[in-house]
Amino acid sequence: MLVVLGFVGFVLALLISVTLHEGGHFLTARRYGAKATQFFVGFGPTLWSRQTGETEWGVKAIPAGGFVRIVGMTRLEEIDPADEHRALYNRPARQRAVVLAAGSIVHFIIAIVLVLLSALAIGKAVEKPPGIASVAPCITAGVGQACDAGGTLPSPAQDAGIQVGDTVLAVAGTPVNSVLEFVTEVRRYPGETIAITVDRGGVPQDLTITPAAVLRPSLTEGAATERVGAVGVLPEFRRGTERLGPVEAVGYSVTMMGDILTGIVTTFTEKLGTITEVYTDERDRDGFIGIVGAGRISGEVIASDETLAFKVLGFLGLIAGLNFFVGVFNLLPLLPLDGGHLAVLGYEQARDRVRRLMGYRGPVRSVDLNKLMPLTYAVVVFFAGFTLWLLGADIVNPIRLNS
């Protein structure tokens, strides 16, 4: 039930985001005097509509987006001569650019606001000192060896009295705040007697322990092995939240936006080849995912065993990331995306400047969009195919949150 609730919440958040996107176009167009005749949520047959002034507002049957119809978005439209003076293409270039970019700007604002509000209300997720999930009766001296009931080597953790449920605070006097820090510190002391500080029932205790000297794969050199310390425990990942003040929350939000942008760039520059693996067991869980897959993960976040705070952080983070991605994607310089129209507008203005330097004094000459239609259709077909490819993968071979 919670999975369905999370999925429905994701769909609603997506619809709200798309509606606000179209609202950005609508408000800026109206601000500059362009005429907007329709504002609809959804596609397909009309379920409800109402005329207010010159704009028809309504809801359509398929909740897969929305649209606003602005008179004169391109010169390919046939418009009423009476509306010619209010056509968007007759607005100054700067105003047209604002209208075209408004949708993506709204997505960026949504993403920043969601991250900022979650940071102020809940905080940021941080890793906490690790717990002890299990204590081994023995440890192996080398890579690939078996540990029988008697043990290849005695378990230093068992001998030292480390117990399941302990929280590790420090190793040899060095505070540890993550599983990686704990493992790294223990590995530094093969065969040396040190103190491990644990919290047991709210009481700190120093336990004397001698990590066994064993061969283990290097953490930095790939397949190489090295002599390191081991104590025979399975550390437990733990995390919590850290409250942030207004200034810290703003800085954190900016950092998060940078991380999201880096992730988008990395996915398209380094993981493009993995698109052929989305139907196989080799599917990259950090790679490409479609809307259905993102909705499924949203449902799994809500249905997880995490605390309410982490569920909210995860859900809002997912919606923020989606909005940021849509904002970036929509600015790609490809028709029919808004970024494609911005690219055409920029080309027209740059070409006009060059011509005026050469003595031309006539009106700005528009690009013949008919000549770009084959490319536009190719882009539409490609993105439609890409979307369907990911849709199928998300259904038959979904990425799961805890896989």
Image (cartoon, rainbow, N blue to C red):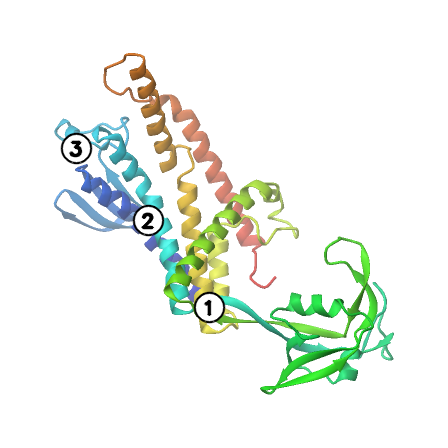
- Does residue 151 lie above or below 116 as drawn? below
Q: CA distance from mark 1 to mark 3?
A: 47 Å
Mark 3 nearby-residue class (10 Å; few <14, some 14–19, many ≥20) = many
Residue 95 image point, x, y percent = 25, 35
Q: Which mark is residue 311?
A: 1
Q: CA distance from mark 2 to mark 1?
A: 25 Å
Nearer to us of marks 2 and 3 is 2
Instruction: Name the one closer to the observer, 386 or 170.
Output: 170
What residue appears at the point 50 percent right and 64 percent down from the top-left corner?
300
Mark 2 nearby-residue class (10 Å; few <14, some 14–19, many ≥20) = many
Q: Which residue is mark 2?
A: 106
- Does residue 233 lie above or below 73 as drawn? below
User: Callout 1, which amino acid?
Assistant: Lys
Nearer to us of marks 2 and 1 is 2
Q: Which residue is mark 3?
A: 86
Q: Earlier in the sequence, mark 2 or mark 1?
A: 2
Q: Is residue 44 left or right of residue 159?
A: left
Residue 275 image point, x, y percent = 58, 43
User: Callout 2, which amino acid?
Assistant: Val
Mark 1 nearby-residue class (10 Å; few <14, some 14–19, many ≥20) = some
